[in-house]
Image (tube, grey):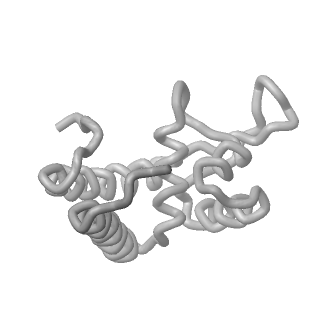
Amino acid sequence: MPTPLTKTDFEALSEFRYQIRRFERFSEDVVQAEGITPLQYLLLLHVKGYPGRDYATVGELADRLQAKPHGVVALVSRCEENFLVERRPSEVDRRQVEIHLLPAGERVLAHLAQLHRTELQSLGSVFSVPNINR
């Protein structure tokens, strides 16, 4: 049987959730001010941040976004219309389509990621934040 939570435990959980939501709200505001949606920002981030390479497949992005592949296809299409990403057939497996950032996507992402990093660093005193290069 787990140990019952104390008032201090509830306060810590409440503060943690509050800070997560505060960060999400900050993110929503700065992303929309840049003229894209929060999901478009996350798509750009996951393409650039995919481990080991500079592109991701729709399936990999669906996993990262915790979304259905058909929804990610629609999201990629909207990003393509804004010249943020492009689809390329995979040279390794022609059945796969790679999603690559375009220069405009790189610029938007770099600016927004800098803002997010600064905000995350400000939260470091509230709870442990992963080590992010300064």
Q: Residue furthest right?
A: 95
Evaluate whether residue 61 shows in this view. yes
Horizontally, is 44 left or right of 23 in the view? right
For the point 34% across and 61% down, the residue is 5
76 up-or-down from 134: above or below:
below
Q: Nearer the viewer, residue 69 or 128?
A: 128
22 up-or-down from 64: above or below:
below
Q: Position of residue 81 (x, y in %)?
A: 62, 66
For the point 29% across and 39% down, the residue is 130
Q: Position of residue 9 (x, y in %)?
A: 27, 60
Q: Would you identify the image quadrant in which residue 72 lies?
A: bottom right
Q: Position of residue 96 (x, y in %)?
A: 80, 38
Q: Position of residue 115 (x, y in %)?
A: 24, 58
For the point 21% across and 63% down, the residue is 8
Horizontally, is 46 left or right of 25 in the view? right
Number of marks in the rendered image: 0
For the point 52% across and 46% down, the residue is 46
115 up-or-down from 11: above or below:
above
